[in-house]
Image: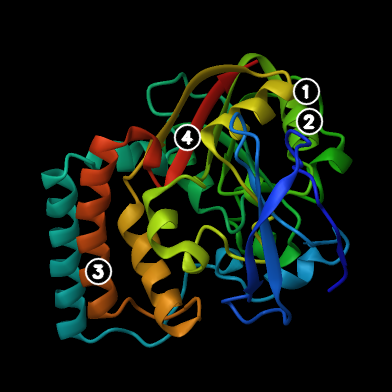
């Protein structure tokens, strides 16, 4: 995979200090080692890969990536006992989230905070196999997606229109969408400001933008460091702080409404980071082990307590803006 050097911060242009070296692709899709820098500017704090894969080669890092699968991770039909166990575990997870007062926030994340807004026309940037779009469609939204991966787009429901190709090259009509959403996409993009400017062009006046992405200042990053799932080299080109994401959105012409962090999905992120720390492998298929589920519940609890004390340390940043 070809690369190019990025010595200065892609968001603010300041010098970055070498943060990590000898990182490897935990998904074992591409070979090689990767390094990352952290911006020195206290008003920014972006983390980025240096060197960074060239845009023409980055597709190689997604050849068998889990976000571009159809969600079927085990072809074997579960036994009656396994179905009962899954039912019990699912119920316990729901009870645990209620006990931590995270149920409502988790549900809002799963629908990108569009519940309560008048249903209109929504575009998901980087829609993958369309799971989010199916949820939004059930809420009454007229849904469309965009993705650069033809395999992922082909998996999406036939009733969902997916625009295949780079968003800036699609030349979609201006002021067409009441909402534009991107869930864990902006960290994969070489030129985030340009992408957000195109989203601004596509949104109707008063249209909403909702972004969810990893938080470089998160509790999980502080614990797991170079094993943190949020780094995910070489696919995550940038990992934002609250300040740097706000600055990026400002540069694209959007008007911020709310920016905050959430710990509502921290358990799975941190349990996966623990798995990476132990085995150096990002597991992308198969059912969760009992060990993984136990640690996910434990980390969900500790992350919740930490977030109550440090509201800026949630695993995910959520930004909501309007045109």
Instruction: Provide residue 217's location: percent of width, then percent of height.
Output: 47, 44
Pointer 3: what residue? 295
Determine if residue 49 is in view. Answer: yes
Circle 3 Cα neighbour tier, 10 Å, few/some/many (<14 / 14–19 / ≥20)? some
Pointer 1: what residue? 201
Judging from the image, what secondary structure is the residue with disc 4 in?
Answer: strand
Task: Out of 220 and 130, give the one closest to the viewer.
Answer: 220
* Location of the C terminus (image quadrant): top right
Judging from the image, what secondary structure is the residue with disc 2 in?
Answer: helix
Which residue appears farthest toward the top when viewing the image? Answer: 205
Which residue lies at the image location 64% right of the left edge and 57% below the top edge?
Answer: 236
Task: Out of 293 and 21, give the one closest to the viewer.
Answer: 21
Residue 231 found in image quarter: bottom right
The image shows residue 294, relative to residue 11, as above or below, that is below
The image shows residue 278, relative to residue 121, as above or below, that is below
Q: Quick one: label 2 or label 3, which is nearer the N terminus?
A: 2
Is the Cβ of the residue at disc 1 closer than 8 Å to that at disc 2? yes
In the rendered structure, find residue 189 and report the number of the disc placed on it.
none
Pointer 2: what residue? 198
Pointer 4: what residue? 318
């Amino acid at each position: 995979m070809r690369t190019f050097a990025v010595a200065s911060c892609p968001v603010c242009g300041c010098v970055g200090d070498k943060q990590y070296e000898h990182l490897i692709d935990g998904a074992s899709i591409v070979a090689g080692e990767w390094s990352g820098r952290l911006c020195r500017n206290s008003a920014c704090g972006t983390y980025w890969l240096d060197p960074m894969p060239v845009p023409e080669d980055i597709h190689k890092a997604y050849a068998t990536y889990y976000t571009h699968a159809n969600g079927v991770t085990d072809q074997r039909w579960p036994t009656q006992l396994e179905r009962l166990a899954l039912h019990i575990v699912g119920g316990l997870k729901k009870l645990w989230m209620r006990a931590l007062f995270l149920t409502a926030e988790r549900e809002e994340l799963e629908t990108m905070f569009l519940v309560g807004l008048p249903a209109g026309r929504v575009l998901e940037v980087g829609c993958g196999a369309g799971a989010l779009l199916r949820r939004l469609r059930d809420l009454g939204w007229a849904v469309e997606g965009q993705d650069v991966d033809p395999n992922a787009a082909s998996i999406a429901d036939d009733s969902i229109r997916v625009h295949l190709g780079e968003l800036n090259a699609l030349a979609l009509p201006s002021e067409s969408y009441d909402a534009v959403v991107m869930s864990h996409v902006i960290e994969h993009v070489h030129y985030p400001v340009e992408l957000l400017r195109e989203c601004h062009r596509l949104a109707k006046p008063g249209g909403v933008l909702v972004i969810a992405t990893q938080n470089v200042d998160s509790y999980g990053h502080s614990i797991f460091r170079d094993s943190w799932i949020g780094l995910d080299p070489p696919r995550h080109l940038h990992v934002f702080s609250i300040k740097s994401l706000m600055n990026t959105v400002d540069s694209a012409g959007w008007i911020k409404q709310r920016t905050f962090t959430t710990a509502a999905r921290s358990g799975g992120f941190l349990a996966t980071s623990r798995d990476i720390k132990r085995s150096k492998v990002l597991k992308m298929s198969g059912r969760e082990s009992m060990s993984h589920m136990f640690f996910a519940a434990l980390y969900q609890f500790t992350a919740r307590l930490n977030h109550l004390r440090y509201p800026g340390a949630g695993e995910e940043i959520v930004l909501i803006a309007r045109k």
